[in-house]
Image (tube, grey):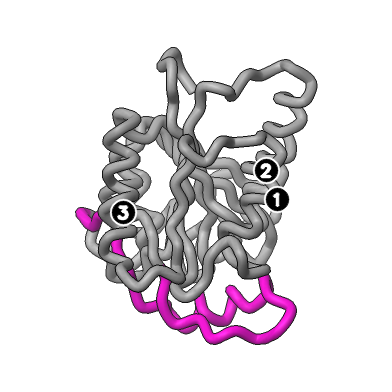
Amino acid sequence: MGSRKHPLLCAASGDSPSDLYRHLVARVAQKDLDVSGWAFLGLDEWVGLNGSDEGSCRYHLDRELFLPLHVPQEKLFFFDGRKEDLASECQQAESFIARYGGIDATILGLGLNGHVGMNEPGTSVSTRSHVTALDPITAQTGQKYFKEARSLSEGITLGIGTILDSRNIFLLVSGAKKAAIVKTVLEGDVSEKVPASLLRRHPGLRIYLDGEAASLLSSR
């Protein structure tokens, strides 16, 4: 996380980053890494849900990262999708980022439709934290995190502009089902129609793919 005394890490929930979080937690437990000065930020959340809801983004990250690392509440911001004033939640996210002098590293997964966070196809490259209507693909894919069917229609997320302000961006993608969108993101046009393609303009972007996710790329 560089040489900054109090770096800020933005974490995405989902399947692809899980191994990274397990590795991070293990290194801290083994005292190979000290994160006591770090602050943490959640990437997104389903509107209507928060950490008390099994299947929410916060619920998963609490268990995979924040609780194992004993992150104090004052060093953590996460959207509360249950709040009535979601515009205030967006403002608080941006203020938290500013308090720590910007995001040092943002960890991202990739949606089947090319979204990052809950920035759906067509999201402006300049968008800051906002509430958005979910693409039907996102709403359907999100069901896998819940034991029973949930109504998912909106999300609250850091914007593309907010993400691109990060000093470093790590895009992690795994599985054959993501191979087609990986090819579009990396070899297609850079376009707001495929939000993840906008990351290609970032000088601090690093992309990590497993063999299945990379299987359709022209150059391996």
Task: Name which residue type carries label 2.
Answer: Leu
- Marked residue nearer the N-terminal end (3 or 1): 1
Magenta-drawn segment: 126-155
Q: How many marks?
A: 3
Q: CA distance from mark 2 to mark 3?
A: 28 Å
* Disc 2 target residue: 67
* Rendered location of residue 89, percent (x, y): 33, 59
* Disc 3 target residue: 160
* Rendered location of residue 136, percent (x, y): 47, 83
- Residue neighbourhood size for the residue with mark 2, other residues' Cα within 10 Å, grouped as few (<14), some (14–19), many (≥20): few
Q: CA distance from mark 3 to mark 1?
A: 26 Å
Q: Secondary structure at mark 1?
A: helix
Residue that protrudes farthest toward the top in the picture: 3
Residue located at (52% from left, 41% from top): 73
Residue that protrudes farthest toward the left in the picture: 126
* Disc 1 target residue: 63
Q: CA distance from mark 1 to mark 2?
A: 6 Å
Taking 145 as reference, is 166 left or right?
left
Task: Name which residue type carries label 3.
Answer: Ile
Residue 121 to residue 98: above or below: below
Q: Are marks 1 and 2 in contact (CB under 8 Å)?
A: yes
Residue located at (77% from left, 30% from top): 26
- Residue 104: assigned label: none
Taking 189 as reference, is 181 left or right?
right
